[in-house]
Image (tube, rainbow, N blue to C red):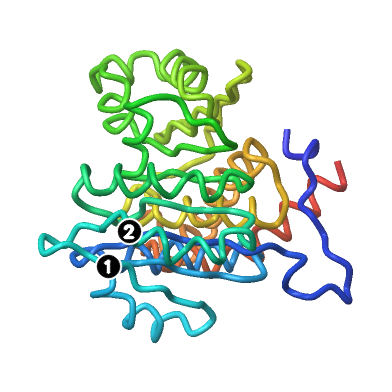
Amino acid sequence: MLARWPLPKPPEDADKEVRGHVLVVAGSDEMPGAALLAAVAALRAGAGKLTIAAPAAIAQGLAFAIPESRVIGLPQARSGGLLVRGTESLAATAHLVSALVVGPGMQQERAVVGFVRALMPLFGHATVVLDALAMSLVRTGAVDQPAVLTPHAGEMAYLSGSTKEAVCEDPVGAAREAATRWNACVALKGGSTIIASPDGGLWQFDGGSAGLATSGSGDTLAGLMGGLAARGLPPLAACAWGVVAHASAGAALSRSHGPLGYLARELAGELPARLHALGKRRAAN
């Protein structure tokens, strides 16, 4: 499958603009690390430029933690939730962004959905990766631009109005129905990850491992997909490459650390080598 979509390879003399610009909108007062994990993964995926938009309370800390990024502080309500007017500060750079990652670590669902609903039209030209609470946008209707959603079984149950038990009993059916209803590529995460496209395409990936089920792993996966999309992969390809490379990074850490106990923050460091190796293998085949 991956051989159909070779990773974009920029010319040796290409500058960072050629590899795309990814915007990560993420984090909250209680979970600033989610923004960091997603943002670093986007760069490790090979994106050329990175901007982070995060609640003002955590923006400066993220700027120090990721000096490679531009960081924009977003206005917050007294409750800590994002204010819709914060989207105005992103409008000026919207035309520069080729991929958007929204949701890791964000809190207060109602505020998040209102913010994302106002944000999406600014990035109609970009591939959007919706994660965590940002996925709640689809509860109000289908997405009308290229998008990837990354629910686990519990999130899928909530978004679809089903039960977790029903999703686990028929993950293929749940993913297929969601992709069609939401007009988006869906990666239903689990021991086996089901990838579904809006046109009915279905794939199952069984190469994950128990160690990947750790705090922050999903944030890393969302950022990875966004970075691959920024490089030029279409949504389905970015989704598929992200799932496989994420698992490959986990497998590498399992060999060096053991099957359990490695950290999500360690996954990103494995990604460049894993992507390079996967690319060479697919080219050879």
Secondary structure under tag 2 reads: helix
Closest to the observer: 250 or 197?
197
> What numbered label is drawn on residue 281?
none
The 10 Å Cα crowd at callout 1, few under 14, some 14 to 19, many 20 or more, is some
Residue under the image location 23 percent in, 48 percent down: 111
On the image, the x and y values in percent for residue 83 come to 26, 57
Q: Are marks 1 and 2 in contact (CB under 8 Å)?
A: yes
Q: Which residue is mark 1?
A: 75
Separation of residues labelled 1 and 2 (CA atoms):
8 Å
Residue under the image location 49 percent in, 34 percent down: 187
* 12 to the left or right of 255: right
The amino acid on which the numbered mark 2 sits, given as a three-letter code, is Arg
- Residue 75 picture quarter: bottom left
On the image, the x and y values in percent for residue 244 come to 59, 44
Residue under the image location 52 percent in, 17 percent down: 180
Q: Which residue is mark 2?
A: 85
* 121 to the left or right of 139: right
- Quadrant location of the N terminus in the rendered image: top right
* 134 to the left or right of 15: left
- Quadrant location of the C terminus in the rendered image: top right
Q: Nearer the viewer, mark 1 or mark 2?
A: 2
On the image, the x and y values in percent for residue 119 come to 43, 50
On the image, the x and y values in percent for residue 279 come to 76, 53
Residue under the image location 23 percent in, 18 percent down: 163
The amino acid on which the numbered mark 1 sits, given as a three-letter code, is Pro
Count the marks: how many? Answer: 2
Secondary structure under tag 1 reads: loop
